[in-house]
């Protein structure tokens, strides 16, 4: 019997009454492993109403008790770490190692949420005027919502709801319909950790469920992670409906390789950062800019990337798995064909790659282009597949100009032995997350995930202090107490009831 993924609405696990059924498939052979019903309008509305009702009591729960729920949750997540990673690997096709990383990066955010009391501390100034003090409190907003993509089904939901709930909000999560089994397990464990009824709601579905959330008057803030076009639509629609919004969208991340860099480190790091996880990472390095003589390393990089073998999630020798769907594979393959047609030098072509016994899976072998220029489609579009585009630049200034001309600004890296080159790059580059001899510079949760330009719309970013600001309001109180009342309060004949 096929597994049925459930919604979690008003404290109940329900299959839902919709006739719109979505199949969850194993990307290695496209066989159905589970089904999920898209939530009905009435189900999404019940979830939001339940979250609104729960907010009244949850916001009154002391911050240390809310932190204790997070402590329980991180303990349960660690205990169930491998089990969650197995579910995740089966529905995404990620290798087990990658799946474990996805879960672990989420757990780190929950660990950070355990420290919520210090993150919510306000500011005080005594005597802003004679006998008047000003102090601020951080208060929750109400019902917040999260809409998440397929590529990190554990980490990205965990970027959102633990911090939102720790701040005292309630939360409606609408995860990707392509891999909803992992989020279901995350929410089961959150309930076990002690989240009271109504505090967390899980609704599945696609655009129609999202559209309801974007327009619902009781949703105060929306966090979205996903593709560029959908992200822009979410930002425009939700802000039009006067919501607080943060949108983390697509990317095209450049890596600059200086000729003084450690060649072996460059090659080792670039292999994993470009085609690892089948390139389905918003921080994947998909463009390598070789400065000056560094271009002589391209043949060695090609030889290293050619050795990378995709495979099944439980194959310990597999470097990465299939891409998520036949549609994703089709898109990648047609972009590769377009790269060839536009005159890029196709050094490796993974179009026909397959795994014996799993020929119907969404496999794309490691692919590499040389002599890529900025006018090519393979350069302009986020391919979101295991495809590395190599470009050449004469100087560091030229490389910076290339990177800064990109409409995206999620992540970048420079490989160099020169502190001066690294300093210049980190200072001048218009990208929000910079690695210096570090290929995928995803900040740990005590910082924030700070994409820029077309990779991010909003102002407060994910996790860290910025997320606490995003999921809360600041209330500033200016108070004055009269000395004359002190005389009354301390009078000897004062009675206390
Ligand atoms: P997607 O945009 O297709 O879907 C994301 C979410 O939006 C899903 O929950 C989906 O159901 C919903 N959705 C899809 N179409 C919609 C529509 N027309 N209207 C309303 N909602 C809609 O993204 P994806 O393919 O699941 O994820 C991959 C993308 O996510 C890549 O572009 C990647 O770069 C991006 N991403 C960005 C970051 C970041 O931090 N910047 C992190 C991870 C992924």
Image (spheres, helix red, strand yellow):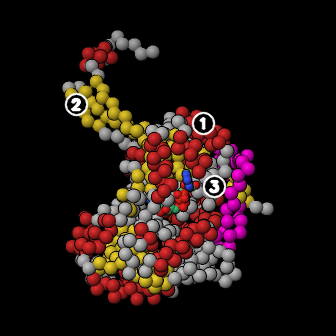
Residue at x-position 36% and y-position 78%: 391
Query: In the picture, which quadrant includes the N terminus?
Result: bottom right
93 left or right of 347 in image: right
Q: Are marks 1 and 2 in contact (CB under 8 Å)?
A: no
Residue 466 spot, x, y in % from top left = 38, 50
Which quadrant would residue 11 be assigned to in this image? top right
Which quadrant would residue 388 be assigned to in this image? bottom left
Q: CA distance from mark 1 to mark 2?
A: 43 Å
- Tag on residue 127? 2
Q: In this orientation, which residue lies closer to the viewer: 112 or 95?
A: 95
Taking 287 as reference, is 447 above or below it?
above
Q: Nearer the viewer, mark 1 or mark 2?
A: 1
Marked residue nearer the N-terminal end (1 or 2): 1
Q: Residues within 10 Å of mark 1 (few under 14, many from 20)?
A: some
Taking 163 as reference, is 52 above or below it?
above
Q: In this orientation, which residue lies closer to the viewer: 138 or 271?
A: 271
Q: CA distance from mark 3 to mark 2?
A: 51 Å
Marked residue nearer the N-terminal end (3 or 2): 2
Q: Which residues lie in the magenta part?
A: 6-34
Q: CA distance from mark 3 to mark 1?
A: 20 Å
193 left or right of 234 in image: right
Residue at x-position 21% and y-position 28%: 129
- Tag on residue 184? 3
Q: Which residue is mark 1?
A: 49
Q: Nearer the viewer, mark 3 or mark 2?
A: 3
320 left or right of 23 in image: left
Residue 2 spot, x, y in % from top left = 76, 61
| Label 1 beta carbon within 8 A of ligand 1 | no
- Tag on residue 398? none
Which quadrant would residue 84 be assigned to in this image? bottom right
Q: Secondary structure at mark 1?
A: helix
Residue 186 spot, x, y in % from top left = 59, 55
């Amino acid at each position: 019997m096929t597994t049925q993924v459930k919604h979690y609405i008003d404290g109940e696990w329900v299959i839902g009454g919709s006739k719109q059924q979505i199949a969850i498939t194993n990307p290695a052979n496209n066989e159905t492993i589970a089904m999920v019903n898209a939530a009905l309008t009435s189900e999404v509305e019940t979830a939001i109403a339940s979250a609104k009702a729960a907010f009244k009591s949850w916001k009154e729960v002391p911050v240390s008790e809310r932190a204790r729920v997070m402590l329980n949750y991180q303990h349960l997540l660690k205990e169930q770490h491998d089990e969650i990673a197995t579910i995740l690997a089966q529905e995404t096709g990620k290798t087990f190692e990658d799946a474990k990383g996805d879960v672990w990066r989420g757990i780190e955010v929950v660990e950070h949420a355990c420290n919520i009391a210090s993150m919510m501390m306000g500011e005080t100034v005594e005597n802003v005027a004679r006998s008047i003090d000003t102090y601020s409190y951080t208060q929750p907003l109400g019902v917040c919502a999260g809409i998440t993509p397929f590529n990190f089904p554990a980490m990205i939901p965990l970027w959102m709801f633990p911090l939102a709930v720790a701040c005292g909000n309630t939360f409606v999560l609408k995860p990707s319909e392509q891999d909803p089994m992992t989020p279901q397990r995350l929410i089961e464990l959150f309930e076990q950790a002690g989240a009271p009824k109504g505090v967390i709601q899980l609704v599945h579905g696609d655009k129609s469920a999202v559209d309801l959330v974007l327009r619902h008057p009781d949703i105060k803030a929306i966090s979205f992670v996903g593709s560029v076009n959908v992200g822009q639509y979410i930002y425009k629609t939700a802000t039009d409906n006067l919501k607080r919004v943060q949108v983390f969208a697509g990317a095209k991340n450049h890596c600059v390789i200086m000729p003084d860099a450690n060649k072996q480190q460059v090659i080792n790091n670039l292999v994993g950062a470009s085609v690892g996880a089948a390139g389905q990472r918003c921080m994947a390095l998909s463009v390598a800019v070789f400065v000056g003589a560094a271009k002589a390393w391209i043949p060695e990089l090609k030889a290293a990337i050619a050795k990378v073998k995709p495979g099944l999630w439980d194959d310990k020798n597999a470097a990465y798995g299939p891409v998520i769907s036949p549609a994703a594979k089709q898109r990648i393959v047609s972009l590769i064909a377009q790269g060839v047609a536009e005159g890029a030098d196709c050094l490796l072509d993974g179009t026909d790659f397959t795994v014996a016994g799993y020929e119907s899976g969404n496999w794309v072998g490691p692919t590499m282009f040389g002599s890529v220029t900025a006018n090519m489609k393979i350069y302009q579009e986020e391919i979101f597949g295991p495809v590395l585009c190599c470009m050449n630049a004469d100087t560091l200034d030229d490389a910076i100009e290339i990177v800064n001309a990109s409409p995206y600004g999620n992540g970048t890296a420079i490989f160099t032995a020169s502190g001066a080159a690294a300093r210049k790059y980190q200072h001048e580059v218009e990208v929000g997350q910079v690695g210096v001899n570090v290929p995928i510079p995803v900040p740990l949760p005590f910082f924030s995930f700070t994409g820029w330009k077309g990779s991010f719309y909003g102002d407060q970013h994910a996790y860290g202090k910025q997320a606490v600001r995003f999921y809360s309001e600041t209330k500033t109180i200016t108070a004055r107490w009269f000395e004359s009342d002190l005389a009354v309060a301390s009078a000897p004949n004062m009675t206390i009831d």
